[in-house]
Amino acid sequence: MTDIASDARTPWWRGEWASLALMLLLLTLARTSLANHYQVPSGSMEPNLMPGDRIAVNMMAYGLRVPFTDIELYDRGEPVPGDIVVFKSPQDGTRLIKRVVAVGGQRVELHDGRLWVDGKSLFDAGATDVEHFGSRAVTLNLTHGGGPDITGIDIPAGMALVLGDHRGNSQDGRFFGLVPTKSLYARAEAVYYRSGEGFGWTKL
């Protein structure tokens, strides 16, 4: 009798475990491949991102990947200048958040923290702490100066130059070099929590 009862219960337990495993797998896929959140660790992106800000990031912005790998299942396009991206530092693998300022085919110069791309300045002549990436206006923090200059580099295809908005206080592409666009695994979409302000939704 005991053996028969045990056998009768087995399919039910197997079904429960299978359902639980499937649910955990779907949650993992959603978290690692679709959307996630990120906490800003430093002031390198001030004034647009503050230390401790919690950021909603789109993990599908540049393609869908197998969780926990760099294997891309399909491509959804390339980052564009002005995007704020999450990636691993080429130096030590630390997760960083910076702004893409130039991509393959563009020539970049940086003087006193202000950008020239393809020979054209991006800063606003009426407010020299504001740069324009297309229709996107970005306010810089230049209170600590502009950091190291870039005398002129041509960005190869498949690569991107990333900088912090706090130009004088950012360990960015001027220190660790260009970043492969394939390694940019998420785009920051909005600040959803800021200390002292609470929850909200500030688009980036």
Image (cartoon, rainbow, N blue to C red):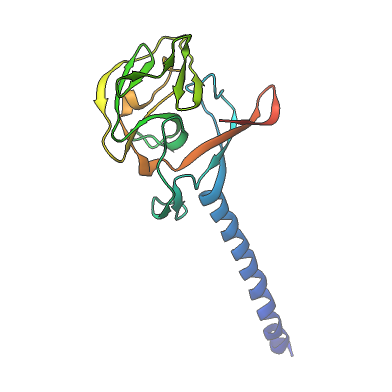
Q: Quadrant of residue 47?
A: top right
Q: Is residue 177 left or right of residue 36?
A: left
| Figure quadrant of the C terminus | top right
Give the percent coordinates (x, y) of residue 109: 30, 19
Left of 200 or right of it: where is 129?
Answer: left
Classify 77 as above or below 49: below
Picture coordinates of residue 101 (x, y %)?
A: 39, 27
Q: Is residue 107 above or below residue 13?
A: above
Question: Can you say which quadrant of the picture contains the N terminus?
Answer: bottom right
The answer to which quarter of the image holds residue 23 is: bottom right
Which one is in front, 41 or 163?
163
In the image, residue 102 sits, relative to residue 19, either above or below, namely above
Q: Position of residue 134 (x, y in %)?
A: 45, 27
Residue 157, by quadrant, is: top left
Rendered residue at 39%/13% (across/down):
146
Relative depth, front residue between 202 and 41:
202
Q: Position of residue 137 (x, y in %)?
A: 50, 22
Q: Which residue is rendered at x = 44% and y = 53% of the image?
A: 65
Report whether 191 appears left or right of 157: right
Residue at position x 73%, y 85% in the image: 5
- Is residue 104 positioned above or below 43 on the image? below
How many numbered discs sit on the rendered protein? 0
